[in-house]
Image (spheres, rainbow, N blue to C red):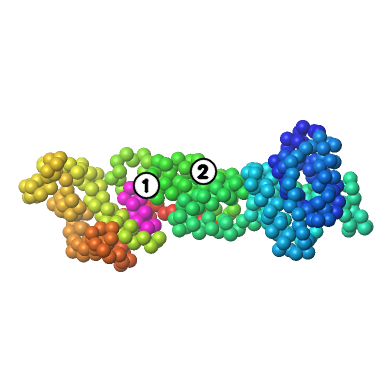
Amino acid sequence: MDPKIDKETAIDAMVISIGGTSAPIIKAVLHYRPEFISFLASQDTIDKVSDIKKACQDEQINFKSEVTVVDNVNDLLHCYKKAEEAIKRVTDKKFSKDKVIVDYTGGTKNMSVSLALAVISQGFSFSYVGGKERTKNGVGIVINGAEEIYKSVNPWDFLAIEEKKKIALLFNQYQFVATKQLCETMSEKATSQKTFFKKLGFAIEGYYFWDLFRHKDALDRFRKATIEEIQELGDDGFREFVLKTKDNIRFLEMLVKTEQKLSINFIFDIYANAERRFEEGKIDDAILRLYRLSEMIAQERLIDRYGINTSDVKPDQIPIELRDEFVRRYTSLISGKIQLSQNASFDLLFSLGDALGKAFDENKKTFQDIQSSRNLSYLAHGFSSSKDSTYKRLKGFLLGLEIINIEKVPVFPKLTM
């Protein structure tokens, strides 16, 4: 036995259909040296198993085996069910999928076709024993001793079209957990694209954590994905996904570097999150985020331009005309600190002569109407479902404050497969 060949070709298990001659099977077994073989035989070929085992033992190749017998080789459905049984004998033993070979050389046409069909979804590779020298003037069976082994690709690499479409569909609907799980399944079954699906899974998990505002975890997953390699390993359709993700990673890096959460980029991020919730049809969740955003916009302007922390406002930071009222109304009985509400924050900005405060004051009645609609929702204080119109009005109000630059808002890419 050539140890070099053994190392390169040896696999853990095989599923083999048996035909009228043992020579091709013996050739394949000696080549791959499996630990276990699941044979698919007919009533007429079951006796070949002992011949195959003896011939291999003579070459110091020993393996364990089980046999599934096809009773009616002319019944395609019956053959298919028996092929599934033969495959299950391998899958039950938990062999690594990339260490399993299916040889469909022998058996009737129904047996070979059934075995090939039944194994497609498993992620095993195919092998076929052929040869240039055949009986019957080149159209019969391969002459003994002239056999050649042709290892084919894993059909999962190019036939798993529906699974790839499902990955795109789930990701585009922000179902990141399900998408990641499907990528893991694809990575287990694929051969040539194993690394691709693993890296794509990391990228998808990055978007999952980002959607939860877990920015550091998201950045870690994107780095594990090495996003450039996804484009190299995947199809051309991933080019746009990769380019957009690169831009998003740069935005994410800025978020992670900003210890102060009241940053303009964080405002952009929450706005983007609200848009995704609205796209999902989660209207109450979307409105909740925009409502929080309206408060955060005022807080960010006060801390960024005036150094005023709305959770701990100093009396001398309040204009004299508002000071007594604000101290009286907004001093916490628990902490003793002046803590401003949303409306009070905008009133303070207006008193300071800030453009944001003026813009809010000009549209205060509109905001109060929207606020009343929001307060009737399940996630606020009422028992009604929010309407699309409430979200759109609140969104329009916030964009009218001219703080949110749509061009700088991060957008999750769409997958196409």
Camera-side residue of 106 and 332: 106
Q: Position of residue 299 (x, y in %)?
A: 23, 48
Camera-side residue of 380 and 21: 21
Quarter of the image where the C terminus is located: bottom right
Name the residue that disc number 1 marks. Answer: 213
Tell me what residue is drawn at x 37 percent, y 54 percent. 272
Q: Which residues are magenta?
A: 266-277
42 drawn magenta: no
Element on which disc 1 rests: loop
269 drawn magenta: yes
Camera-side residue of 321 and 345: 345
Task: Of the two numbered discs 2 and 1 on the same chain, state the one appearing first in sequence.
Answer: 1
- Three-letter amino acid code at disc 1? Phe
Apparent side of residue 90 relative to residue 302 in the rendered image (left or right)? right
- Three-letter amino acid code at disc 2? Ala
Count of numbered marks: 2
* Residue 192 shows up from this direction: no
Element on which disc 2 rests: helix
Camera-side residue of 93 and 115: 93
Q: Position of residue 71 (x, y in %)?
A: 77, 59
Q: Are marks 2 and 1 in contact (CB under 8 Å)?
A: no
Tell me what residue is drawn at x 27 percent, y 65 percent. 384
* Residue 225 shows up from this direction: yes
Name the residue that disc number 2 marks. Answer: 225
Q: Position of residue 106 (x, y in %)?
A: 80, 53
Tell me what residue is drawn at x 43 percent, y 49 percent. 208
State the CA–CA distance, disc 2 to disc 1. Answer: 19 Å
